[in-house]
Amino acid sequence: MQFLSPLGWLALLSVPVLLGLWRLAATRRVTPLSSLIPFERLMARPPRKRSQLVTNILFWLQLAALLFITLTLARPVIWQSRARTVLVVLDTSASMSARAAKGGVVWDQTLRWLHGQLARKGLAEQWFIVTTAPVAA
């Protein structure tokens, strides 16, 4: 697998930004109490730093969306070898019902050969079988 746009991986630099915003939001959470508003300036102290990141389902969804967008911007592709294409044109005219030198009908010999080839067909091969007339022999 290759990436058509490796610069898309630069979007991974936004993951630390997401983590920082979540840490900042967790440490700045203040619940005001109306009875303590007059004493708010007396109780002012620097906020404690959290040692752990508080996460919930929203955080994980945002992180998954960020990683998905990053992978999409990198444009991954899988290169595969093309299948070998074989075109078989079957002549269904009246001449195919003639007898061959060995005594068999040419059409029957052709069908036996075609069935043998299709039995040995590989997985990486495509076979297209086309007849020359609308009515089969």
Image: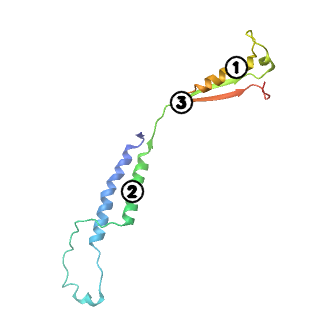
Q: In this view, does 42 lie above or below 59?
A: below
Residue contact between numbered discs 3 and 2, judged by CB atoms under 8 Å? no
Q: How far apart are marks 3 and 1 (CA)?
A: 23 Å
Few, some or many residues within 10 Å of mark 2 (<14, 14–19, 20+):
some
Q: Distance between the residues labelled 3 and 2?
A: 38 Å
Residue contact between numbered discs 3 and 1, judged by CB atoms under 8 Å? no
Which quarter of the rendered picture does the N terminus lie within?
top left
Q: What residue type is labelled 3?
A: Ala
Q: What residue type is labelled 1?
A: Thr
The residue that mark 1 highlights is 110
The residue that mark 3 highlights is 124
User: In the image, which is nearer the foreground, mark 3 or mark 2?
Assistant: 3
For the point 70% across and 22% down, which residue is it?
111
Which residue in the rendered view is the most extreme toward the top?
101
The residue that mark 2 highlights is 66
Q: In this view, does 38 lie above or below 123?
A: below
In this orientation, which residue lies closer to the viewer: 57 or 100? Answer: 100
> Residue 15's image quarter?
bottom left
Number of numbered discs visible in the structure rendering:
3
In this orientation, which residue lies closer to the viewer: 114 or 42? Answer: 114
In this orientation, which residue lies closer to the viewer: 133 or 114? Answer: 114
